[in-house]
Image (cartoon, rainbow, N blue to C red):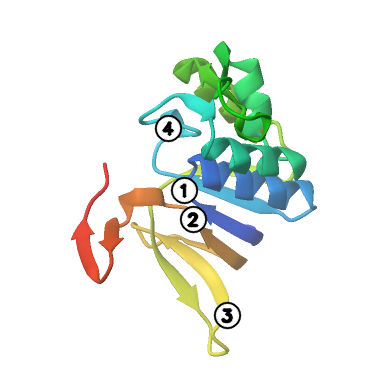
Amino acid sequence: MPEIIPFDVAVIGAGHAGVEAAVASAKRGCKTALFTISLDQIGNMPCNPSIGGSAKGHLVREIDALGGVMGMAGDACCIQMRMLNLSKGVSVHSPRAQADRRKYHTYIKQICENTPNLQIIQTEIADIEIDENQRVKAVVNRFGAKYPCKAAVLCTGTFLNGMVYIGKTGVESGP
């Protein structure tokens, strides 16, 4: 087996959060691995292909202000743009873009592929190895291959035994 070069950061999951975490880490000079189960699912928009709106729009603008990729990808892949709440006060006006899902995925994947210090690895991570000082030592795929790293960021979304909590009641949920 070839020697695996250690990473500063291992990001597990390549949805919106994983992509933002991996690109931000790599832009700051950290040797970063972005792990995904499928290269065809990087930046996937599984449900609603809208970016922005009165709730999510605030988050998108914050990501954009910090140099994130979601806003750029939304602009590049927009098929319709609309200003919401125009009949209400100016403080609640909110832009919302509808993105072409396939184009969005391709755009996000190209950003990841072309970001220096970022390596995309298609494999399923099954474990995180911790050293005697309770620090991350490596992430381990389902076949036992170890990827040494100094930090691990979990961005698995709802696919990791997703739970929805309402009060004290927990219900298994997620796609």
Disc 3 + disc 1, Cβ < 8 Å: no
Q: In the rendered image, which residue does mark 4 sit on?
A: 41
Under tag 3, what secondary structure? loop
Which residue corresponds to the image point at 54% horizontal and 24% vertical from the top-left? 85
Which residue corresponds to the image point at 53% horizontal and 38% vertical from the top-left? 56
Q: Is residue 23 above or below residue 146?
A: above
Q: Earlier in the sequence, mark 4 or mark 3?
A: 4
Residue 26 % position (x, y) = 72, 48
Marker disc for residue 54? none
* Number of numbered discs: 4
Q: Quadrant of the C terminus?
A: top left
Which residue corresponds to the image point at 68% horizontal and 44% vertical from the top-left? 62
Marker disc for residue 13? 1
- Circle 3 crowding by C-alpha within 10 Å: few under 14, some 14–19, many from 20: few
Q: Earlier in the sequence, mark 2 or mark 1?
A: 2
Marker disc for residue 1? 2
- Circle 4 crowding by C-alpha within 10 Å: few under 14, some 14–19, many from 20: some
